[in-house]
Structure formats: C-alpha cells, structure tokens
Image (tube, rainbow, N blue to C red):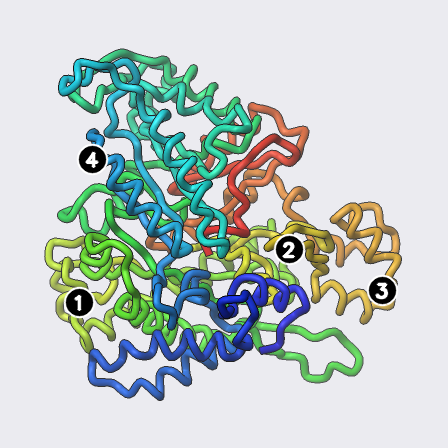
Amino acid sequence: MELTENAVTVIRSRYLLKDAEGRIRETPEEMLRRVAGTVASSEALYGKDRGEWEKKFYDIMDNLLFLPNTPMLINAGKELGQLAACFVLPVDDSMKSIFDSLKNAALILQSGGGTGFSFSKLRPRADIVKSTGGIASGPVSFMRIYNTATEVIKQGGARRGANMGILRVDHPDILEFIRIKRNERELTNFNISVAVTDAFMKALKNDLEYDLINPRSGNVSGRHKAKEVFKEIVESAWETGDPGLIFIDRINRDNPTPHIGTIESTNPCGEQPLLPFEACVLGSINLAKMLKDRTQSTEHRAQTYEIDWPLLASIVKITVRFLDNAIDANRYPVPDIEKMHKGNRKIGLGVMGWADMLIKLGIRYNSKKAFSLAREVMSFIRDNAREASSALARERGAFPNFKGSIYDTPEINAKGGLRNATTTTIAPTGSLSIIAGCSSGIEPLFAIAYRRKAVDTELHVIHQYFLEVAKERGFYSPELIERITKQGTLRGIKEVSQDVKRLFVTAHEIAPEEHIETQAAFQEFTDNAVSKTINLRQRASREDVGLAFMLAYEKGCKGITVFRYGSKGGPLVKFEEGD
C-alpha cells in the first residue's frame, strides 16, 4: 500500500488490531489480509476456491482501487465480526418497541454501525395513553433518550455514535421536531430529516394547508399551512444545517421490494434508504485510480489522462462479489436484521475520488462536461454492477425476496434474476478517502490545503495533484502552501495561473444549484441514494436554502442536506459515519 502520512495516522488510530494494553499488533497489509480472508471465506458456501478470490480482494484494496465500509475494516476476523455500515430499526408506538429498538441500536452502535429511525409512528405529545390513563410525551422526548444512550456507548471508541432521526411532515409534532436542534445541546448524536411527501410539496407550491395525521388513530388532528412549515424548516437548516429533507414518496417509488415493506428511514448520512430491520454493506471504488495515461511523452508536456473503462468494469465485477460475500460473512447483532439483510441482500457500491478524476481529466467540477460525465460514469457502474449481480444470481441464486419484487419480470427472470435488491449507493467515504489518498465521495475539494481534526489528532491536508502541478509549473514554495492553507482556496494568489485556479475549484466557490446538479446526475443512475452536502457560503440567505430544497425535489434527488459555512451545530461530521 502506498499510504500518505495522514492515511497511516488514521489507520493506526482506528483500524489496526490492538492487544489488551492498546498496543498495535498488525500492519496495514495484515489488516487487508484479515479483511480479504474473512470476505473470501464465503466462497466455500458456494463450492468455490477461496484462495483465488482472497488474492483478488486483497489486490484491489492493496492498490487502493477499492475500500469497503469502515466496520468491515475494523471488525472483519474479530469475534464481533459485524461488517455492515447501515441499519434502520423500527420504532412502533409502544414502550416495548421503543426500548427494544434502543437495545438493538446499542448493539449496532457498539459494533461501528450507524442507525436510522423513523419516529413517525409515535403518538404526539399530550395524546392519551389508554393503558396508564396518562398523556404521551411525544417523539422528541424519546429521541432524547436515544441520544443519551448513544453518548454513553460511543461505539467502543472506534467511531462516534451516529443516528438518523426522521419524522413525517404530517406528524402533529412536526414543528417541535424541526426546531429542536436550534438548541446546540439537543440531539448531538443525531442527524435529523423531515420525511416530505408529494402531497406536502403540492400544497407548498399552491400555497395551501395540508392535513396532520395522528399516527395512533389515523385521523386528521389538525392542519398547517405548508409555507409556514417550510419556512421553519428553512430557518433551522439555515441556522444549524438540520433538518435535511428526504423525499419519502420518491424513495418508496424506487423501493425494490414493496411486497416486503415500506421504507420509512435512511442511515445517518441519508444515502441508504432501508426497510425496518434492514442493513446494507457499502464499498467505494477510487475513481482517481480508474484512469490511464495517454501521454505519448512526458518530456515536454504535462501528463494527460483518460478513463480506463475496461479496468472500471473489472473492478465493479470483483467488488459486487466482494460485497455479496460480506453479507454471508457478517455476524449480525440482531437475528431480525440477519433475516432481512439475507432476504434482500442489499449492497451499496459507490465511488470516491470524483473531484480528483475530474482534475486529472482537466474538467472543472461545476461544468456541464462534468455533469455529463457523472451520468456516463455512474450509468456504466450501475449497468456493470447489475450484470455482475445477475451473474451471481445464476451462480448462487436470486435474493430470497426476488419473487414479487420490481425485478420479477420475464426479461430478468430469463437471465436468472438478480442476487441483490440494490447494488449502488454514493456514501461520503470520509475516513476511507483519507486512507485512499483521494477526495471524498462525489464532493468537490473542501480546500486545496487545510488542517482538519480526525481521530483525536490534527491532519495537514494538501492536495497531492496540486503539489505536482505547482512543482511542474515552477510556482511551488513552502510559503505558498502555508498561504493556501490559511485561506483554503487559490483566490487572489497571483503566482497561480488562471487555468489552474479554474481547475482546482473548492466547495464554497461552487453555486448551490451546481452542487445539486452533481447530486442529481449521480442519483439518476444510483439504486439507493446519494450522500452530498450542499455547501453554502456564510452570507447565503434563508431564501438560498429554500431554493436549494425546491431544486433538489425538482431535479429528482431523494434527499438533501445543506450546510451554511459558519452556522452553529450542523450535521454530524461526515468524516465519521456512512463510510
């Protein structure tokens, strides 16, 4: 492995096995062998040679072409053995369900997974509790209990606890939920999102009221003016970054197994909609490595690159098998989760290094050419992932809940079905991208050079390709790097030519609608959903937030998270969860 200094710091802090005294007892290479061996062990279930696939799995990780989600790197080969990143647990309207889910969440959080919950089935504040004659305290009060439990667990020190809390926009307590994180001390271990319906969006566009539904009785309990509720959502998101929106009806239109259940929630970063008790294993291909040099001679001109499509196709094929194997190799913390995950066999293959790929191709991140390429790359990955899943179905059988699924058609049945109900997801890949030495997920560069906290230490991040260009063009100096580190961008730095400035664009130099266009481009060809932060400048207005929310809905996104630079609180740091 060719690891940067920052990658070594992160791996040593979080991923390598330690003895009882906390001393590291494996190398990064041994970590990858542990993961490859564990995942390849599933081959024996299907009468295949473990050794052949163990080598292939090791090689793609060792060359940083692909990395699986963090729990897999941490837990593979250990007694705990929990390999999945994303979970959704049901919260029904009873004390037993509420605290059963809390217990199950504790087991998941301890193992490094992230949990999502919809609290929409809980009766509203001040509603009658017939069994006791008392009155209900409402969903937000139980979210506080979950938050406290997460704080205590802290995932055994491996990762900070991460939850997603969701409430439907038609729940009677929706305004309390929307406003809760304006207090910085509230729900510090939760991202929160409003499950927005098509009916609400229609009422919003037509300046109408909409019904509030008491989940206990199913009766209309009141009405709100859609514009007033939306105004409150915008205010909180402008102030804190929370709540985000998930477009719940759109998500359920894409639910591959509607006969099994309705999707109510997502994982903590919003990229993985899941049924109650469902889990998903994730992994990401490093797009920065999916390039080949087409320069005839590097003596007199800079290197030029093009996408290596055959390499990308081969990596997709291997990684789909890797993730499907991981489902069988996983040791599940809760039997109901094992049943659901093995019933639908959802996997989420995604990408990281998108911004790096564009830079090496000479394409500006927020250009029409970039948006077009995003669709081309992701459609290629999705098509090849489905082909790989179809091949696995012929070899191992379709996922058990295939009959009655949206894929249960004569055409797909003729090919043997599909092994996995979903194959693609775009995760944030915060820690993984540090290990791989590439940009995170499909995000633009946060800055060209900056200092950031990660795993109880400070990392000095300098974009490697920018360093190469600076040295090649003759404008590199330590003083220049220090200046860039202080301001993050290349704006106003005279030594750097305009073409380099245009190429190395950063998050806050990109308009919100261009962030959304990127998200929508990838979403078009992604089975699950897309984690993407819509970065806003500090001076962005509340109107800017509202326009971003509306555009995301119109563009076909499944959800949206905005974060205005300098706003208080904000979504949980994406470097910690979802990868």
Callout 1 amino acid = Ala
Q: Residue at x 46, y 22 (%)?
A: 179
Pointer 4 residue: 96
Please report whichever mark, 1 or 2, sits nearer to the chain's N-terminal start. 2
Pointer 1 residue: 398
- Name the secondary structure under disc 1: loop
Callout 3 amino acid = Tyr
On the image, the x and y values in percent for residue 164 come to: 39, 40
Q: Which of the pair 46/110 is nearer the observer?
A: 110
Callout 4 amino acid = Lys
On the image, the x and y values in percent for residue 114 come to: 40, 49
Q: Which of the pair 118/362 is nearer the observer?
A: 118
Q: Based on the displayed image, in which of its 4 quarters is residue 404 positioned?
A: bottom left
Please report whichever mark, 2 or 4, sits nearer to the chain's N-terminal start. 4
Q: Nearer the viewer, mark 3 or mark 4?
A: 4
The quadrant of the image that shows the N terminus is bottom right
In the rendered image, the vertical position of residue 414 relative to residue 142, given as above or below: below
Label 2 and label 4: CA atoms lie apart by: 53 Å
